[in-house]
Image: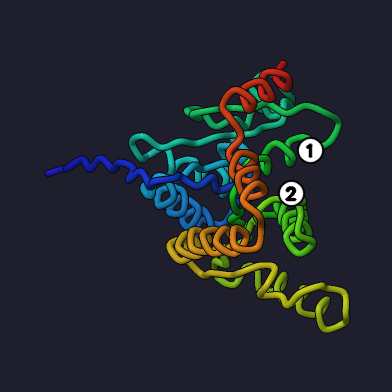
Amino acid sequence: MATTTTTTTTTPAKPLRICVFGSSRATTKESYKTAAEQFGRLLSQAGHININGAGRFGCMGACNKGSLSVEGAVVEGVIHKMWMPEGDKDELQTGMTTLHVADGPTLTQRKEMLCAGSDGFVVLPGGPGTFDELWEVISEFQLGLPKGKCPRPVCLVNVEGYYDPTVMQLQRCFDDGMLYKEVTDVVHCEPTAEKALAYIVAAIGDHRTRFAAAADSKTVADDVVLSHISDELRKSTAQSSTL
């Protein structure tokens, strides 16, 4: 006899805004999409906010599917207008809690909107677009950017060793004197969705504790405000970018 199970969120005291990067191609390997769906589901079950590129294919779509299977999930998407139904190619995931539409001749604005207000980054297997996003947040993290804000950790979901070559390249970069910090100090790897979620939640908490200890009370107060952009400001940003 068939049974139906309904999962619901467990709301933490302060839900984290986790930005998730990953492939957007329908041909993405199934094992990667399975891990992505599990991550989305676990993230939303834990009561955190899933921020991603609002696509319905690949790891991105699978992550959205996982989150949207959870009652009460909050999923915030940022998509370029060219991937909207009325654009060049319809890749939009339906059912998003909030949708922001970016514009411009490149994906720069979209990346800015994805990262704005995020507390940390989780990177699923992906292609050049995902690599672009990954390198940008790694670069910011090692340079202590954005200035005056709590550092935002980065975790790779290293399914089947997908990101092993990336870590090797970073290690070569460090060995040859071109990385400011040890590889493990700028990016972290976990082999499963469950471990990646546990790491990023703990890492955000750890960085916040250290940031608070090193900063004066005013800077800390300002960071809390900036890292959780008000609904009104995010809404106005979305409206100004939506056609």
Picture quadrant where residue 175 is located: bottom right
The secondary structure type at the circle numbered 1 is loop
Residue shown at the point (64%, 25%) measured from the top left: 233
Q: Residue at x 72, y 60 (%)?
A: 141
Mark 1 and mark 2 residues within 8 Å of each other at the beta carbon: yes
Type of colouring: rainbow
Q: Nearer the viewer, residue 130 or 176?
A: 176
Sequence-wise first label, 1 or 2 = 1
Nearer the observer: mark 1 or 2; the answer is 1
Residue 25: tell me if it is visible.
Answer: no
Q: Position of residue 79 (x, y in %)?
A: 66, 32
Above or below, comparing residue 40 to residue 99 in the picture: below
Q: Amino acid at mark 1?
A: Leu
Q: How many numbered callouts?
A: 2
Kind of residue at badge 2: Gly
Query: Is residue 202 in sight in this rendering?
Result: yes
- Residue at point 28% right, 43% down? 7
Checking the image for residue 129, the label placed there is 2
Rendered-image quadrant of the C terminus:
top right
Could you classify mark 1 by the number of other residues whose Cα lies within 10 Å: few (under 14), some (14-19), or many (20 or more)? Answer: few
Q: Is residue 8 left or right of residue 120?
A: left
Q: Residues within 10 Å of mark 2 (few under 14, many from 20)?
A: few
Distance from disc 1 to disc 2, alpha carbons, whole Å, reads: 9 Å
The N terminus sits in image quarter: top left
Q: Which mark is residue 182?
A: none
- On screen, 180 above or below 243? below
Nearest the camera: 69 or 90?
Answer: 69
In the rendered view, does 127 fall on the left or right side of 199? right
Q: Position of residue 34 (x, y in %)?
A: 46, 55
At 35% from the left edge and 43% from the top edge, which residue is drawn?
11
- The residue to which callout 1 is attached is 107
Image quarter for residue 113?
top right
